[in-house]
Image (spheres, helix red, strand yellow):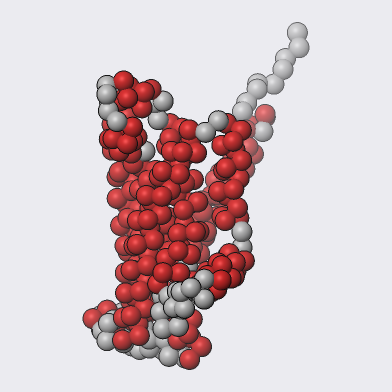
Amino acid sequence: MTHYPKATLESYGYKDYKKTKKFFTVLRKVFVVVIVVSLYIPILMLLLQSVNSSPNINEFGHFTLDWYTNMFDVRSLKNAIINTLLTSVISTLLATVIATFMAVGIYALPKQIRQRVMLLNNIPILNADIVTGISLMLIFSLLLPLFPYIFGPVTLIMAHLFFTIPYVVLSILPKLKEMDTNLMDAALDLGIKPYKALIKVIVPAISAGIFSGMLLALTMSIDDFVISYYTTGNGFDNLPIWIYGSIGRKSLTPSVYAFSTLLTLMTLLSLTLYQVFIKKDKKGKIK
């Protein structure tokens, strides 16, 4: 009678497999940590410089909040911040309203026509910012004989509308696809007028997409430089343009670091609120 050796996990290479799996698990965790740290190092540096008493980035004096309290002492910086918030808020609100109606209209189109319209919607997204900026500048220049002082807040808001609307549309359309198509028909059958059904039925159902699109539009509008540079007028600078000019004049104040830190914290807060909003929206659907 032939005797065979007792089979063990080690004889099938299980031990080597376990070592290899452990190695790749550790490697994966290290890779994730390195990527996350690399992404957040610039933000941490910005935070440190905003509380650094020394304007020199190569040395740290002592902890101070003077750059926050004196943020609006520099008049040009104050005007740039006000201009940025003014144009961003107005363009974001307008883009959200326009894009909501556009998304609803696009979703109601037949499939083939909808695909063609979406292709047109995506062109401004894929287009280079410098091409978009120069194109808009040429269009606004044609209006100079009729409106000699058109370049300024008006052109800046119109330019921001041009490149933010497509992003908001893309944020809303997935929510429209998730929505029950019978909601609108049921509302109309109950005697509600179409515009009231849109406001009271459709908009609440896609509110998560509207909010995410609005947040995206606001973020893009605040930090846009290239398109704003070509479409603004003399004496009306937003924050990115003001920072660019200050670097060229070597007169950049550390208060910019403080305001940038506040913007980062506001963005973090907005994302947190968005996640809470999404969770409540999902719980409502489950119920």
Q: Residue 4 sits in which quadrant?
A: top right
Furthest residue toward left: 69
Q: Return the x and y of residue 49 as percentages of the image width and height.
A: 37, 79
Q: Is residue 43 visible?
A: no
Using the image, determine if residue 211 lies above or below residue 85.
above
Q: Residue at x 41, y 50 (%)?
A: 98
Q: Residue at x 30, y 38 (%)?
A: 199
Q: Quadrant of the N terminus?
A: top right
Q: Return the x and y of residue 264 as percentages of the image width and height.
A: 36, 65
Closer to the camera in the image, 40 or 230: 230
Q: Is residue 137 left or right of residue 191?
A: right
Q: Return the x and y of residue 51 as percentages of the image width and height.
A: 31, 79
Using the image, determine if residue 198 lies above or below residue 126.
above
Q: Residue at x 45, y 83 (%)?
A: 234
Q: Residue at x 32, y 74 (%)?
A: 82
Using the image, determine if residue 179 lies above or below residue 105.
above
Q: Is residue 221 visible?
A: yes
Q: Residue 80 sits in which quadrant?
A: bottom left
Closer to the camera in the image, 250 or 229: 229
Q: Return the x and y of residue 137 as percentages of the image width and height.
A: 55, 71
